[in-house]
């Protein structure tokens, strides 16, 4: 619970006398009250952490990593948390929309494991019109650099003036998948916004705004 080691490894660390409770070497049978007792490993204080969950409507020109060597704004700048968060399913610098941030490794695994096939829905804007054949190709799968994409869902196609927007749902997450699918289908990509991950939507959040969830609330979506 302190992010130090697995349960089994923790037992062997305790058995090697490296753990103390209030200055006294700990035994496997000891119990602690984490509100009162001070637990150390080799003299360093450790504390249990709780899992935190946030969604963010990521603005354009923000990186989805938690730090950036070019000093660009990152998604964690938009979330008020003292814990180290990870981003579930990154978005490109120029892509906007739903990002999930958490320190819960089990949830990250559940959502991102290729076998989970969690749906990701995007609002895509391309230039010009889109033919029935192009829609079909996107739906059935296109070749992106030697990989044939799995079946996708396309809904709400609307052409206004010189642009077409539609919702596209994919059940996998290859790097820059939507942009590469556009290229493979001969579409000129303009904008991309993620609307949902599974049943979790943006919930009316404005760009740059975030919302915290409890564990119970977030797990209902996955
Ligand atoms: N597909 C892309 O091409 N970019 C994203 O940011 C997300 C999905």
Image (cartoon, rainbow, N blue to C red):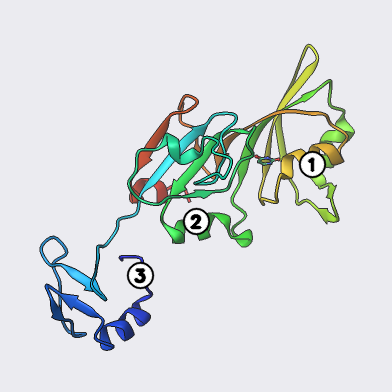
Q: Circle 2: is it few (<14), some (14-19), or many (20+) Cα within 10 Å?
A: some
Work out which residue is located at the far top of the displayed protein and give it. 161
Front-most of residues 21 and 58: 21
The image quadrant in which ligand 1 is located: top right
Identity of the residue drawn at 52% across and 49% down: 88
Front-most of residues 16 and 214: 16
Q: Earlier in the sequence, mark 3 or mark 2?
A: 3
Q: Are marks 3 and 2 in contact (CB under 8 Å)?
A: no
Identity of the residue drawn at 80% across and 22% down: 127
Q: Earlier in the sequence, mark 3 or mark 1?
A: 3
In the figure, is residue 157 to the left or right of 1? right
Q: Which residue is mark 3?
A: 4
Identity of the residue drawn at 22% across and 71% down: 40
Instruction: Specify the quadrant that holds the N terminus.
Output: bottom left
- Asked whether mark 1 lies closer than 8 Å to ligand 1, one says yes
- The image shows residue 52 at horizontal and vertical percentages of 35, 49
Which dot marks residue 181? 1
Identity of the residue drawn at 84% across and 31% down: 187
Q: Give above or below for 107 relative to 130.
A: below
- The image shows residue 174 at horizontal and vertical percentages of 70, 51
The mark lying in front, picked from 3 and 2, is: 3
- The image shows residue 129 at horizontal and vertical percentages of 84, 22
- The image shows residue 19 at horizontal and vertical percentages of 23, 78
Which dot marks residue 167? none
Asked which secondary structure carries label 1, the reply is helix
Q: Circle 1: is it few (<14), some (14-19), or many (20+) Cα within 10 Å?
A: many
Q: Give above or below for 137 relative to 18.
A: above
Which dot marks residue 108? 2
Asked which secondary structure carries label 3, the reply is loop
Q: Circle 3: is it few (<14), some (14-19), or many (20+) Cα within 10 Å?
A: few
């Amino acid at each position: 619970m302190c992010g130090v080691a697995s349960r089994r490894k923790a037992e062997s660390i305790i058995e090697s006398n490296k753990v103390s409770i209030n200055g006294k070497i700990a035994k496997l049978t000891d119990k602690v009250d984490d509100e009162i007792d001070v637990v150390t490993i080799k003299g360093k204080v450790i504390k249990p952490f709780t899992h935190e969950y946030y969604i963010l409507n990521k603005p354009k020109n923000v990186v989805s990593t938690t730090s950036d060597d070019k000093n660009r704004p990152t998604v964690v700048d938009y979330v008020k948390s003292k814990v180290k968060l990870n981003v579930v399913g990154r978005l490109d610098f120029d892509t906007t929309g739903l990002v999930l941030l958490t320190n819960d490794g089990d949830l990250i695994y559940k959502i991102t494991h290729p076998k989970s096939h969690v749906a990701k829905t995007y609002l895509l804007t391309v230039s010009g019109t889109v033919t029935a054949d192009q829609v079909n190709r996107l739906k059935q799968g296109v070749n992106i650099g030697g990989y044939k994409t799995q079946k996708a869902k396309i809904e709400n196609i609307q052409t206004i003036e010189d642009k077409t927007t539609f919702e596209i749902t994919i059940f996998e997450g290859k790097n820059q998948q939507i942009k590469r699918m556009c290229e493979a289908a001969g579409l000129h990509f303009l904008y991309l916004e993620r609307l949902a991950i599974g049943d979790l939507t943006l919930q009316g959040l404005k760009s740059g705004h975030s919302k915290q969830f409890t564990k119970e609330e977030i797990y209902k979506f996955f």
